[in-house]
Amino acid sequence: MRSRRLLFFGLLLLAPTSILIALSSGSADLSLTQLLHGNAAQQEIFWQLRAPRAASAFACGALLALSGVLLQVLLRNPLADPYLLGISGGAAAGALGAMLLGLAAAIKFSAFGGALIALLLVPALSFRRHAWDIHHLLLTGIALSAGFGALISLLLSIAPSAGIHGMLYWLMGDLSYAQSPVQTWAALLASGLASVLLARHLDVLAIGELKAKSLGIAVLPVQGAAYLIAATATTAAVLEAGSIGFVGLVVPHLLRLLGMDSHRWLIPGAILLGGSFLTLADTLARTLVAPQQLPVGVLTALTGAPLLLFLLSRRR
């Protein structure tokens, strides 16, 4: 218990530290004094560029990590991540379709439409006899992901060369245009609160459906709530930042390997670590080869994979 509390305290310190690093780092490094009392140009950099992007990065990372925690319990599959159920693929197909048609103002609307199609299709095709069929749920998500992946490849193959760069950046994750994080934070607060309220039920559900039913847990409502929260969190993150992989897969496993198993600790821990992880990765993405920016999804995989492998080797 003490080690869990120490780890959680460390995550509480990491979150504001990552945001402060994101705010002070860039093509023009700014000190804390300059951030608070700088000239007009420094204040514009802070309020118009860095603050919205850092806030969006933290919220998106937290949403993806939270979604990963919920889906790994719901599907009882350690490989489950926010993109397994096709929601990201639907959003990507919608966004790329809008880009191909030159409808820049409708990219988020089209992405939301694609995500909504996947969000509704998955439970509609996997709900049988007043119960969730987890295997059908998983297979439906995989089938939808494959179908949307084929559609994405088709859109990329017929897109003009001038638009390929923007499409690829959206597919690999891009926070360059994250200017209004309020909606993303609202989704995070709602999803996080609802998940914390489910924490005790998720602990029992992780053992198995029969055990949960024998202990008096209403399995179907808990499963439905977990799916809806995970789908909402994934959709909000994808609409704000595109398809950023690996965060929802690696963050829950990192915390479990460090001894944070109870969802009472795992859910807020995943929110803090996921947000900090993506914030730091995005800071690297825009400063590593500045003024050129790298896709943040590439850096999340390049930094997260070695860390996960290291912890796995130590655990073995």
Image (tube, grey):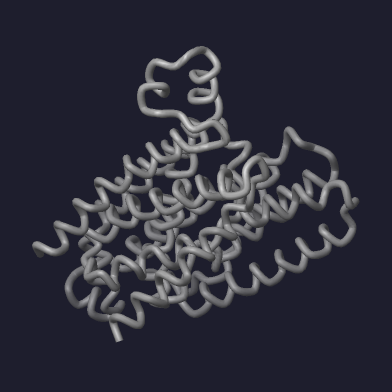
Q: Residue at x 30, y 66 (%)?
A: 255
* Drawn side of residue 140 relative to residue 150, left or right: left
Q: Residue furthest bottom?
A: 316
Q: Residue furthest top?
A: 40
Query: What is the quadrant of the C terminus in the image?
Result: bottom left
Residue 267: % across, % down: 29, 57
Q: Is residue 76 visible?
A: yes
Which of the 4 quarters of the picture holds residue 201?
A: bottom left
Residue 135: % across, % down: 49, 80
Q: How many marks?
A: 0
Question: Relative to 69, does residue 111 appear above or below in the rendering?
Answer: above
Residue 306: % across, % down: 45, 72
Q: Residue at x 59, y 60 (%)?
A: 298
Q: Nearer the viewer, residue 30 or 310?
A: 30
Query: What is the quadrant of the N terminus in the image?
Result: bottom left
Residue 110: % across, % down: 70, 44
Q: Residue at x 62, y 47 (%)?
A: 174
Q: Nearer the viewer, residue 168 or 86?
A: 168
Q: Residue furthest left?
A: 2
Question: Relative to 49, does residue 98 appear above or below in the rendering?
Answer: below
Q: Residue at x 22, y 70 (%)?
A: 259
Q: Is residue 120 visible?
A: no
Question: Relative to 131, does residue 189 appear above or below in the rendering?
Answer: above
Q: Nearer the viewer, residue 168 or 115?
A: 168
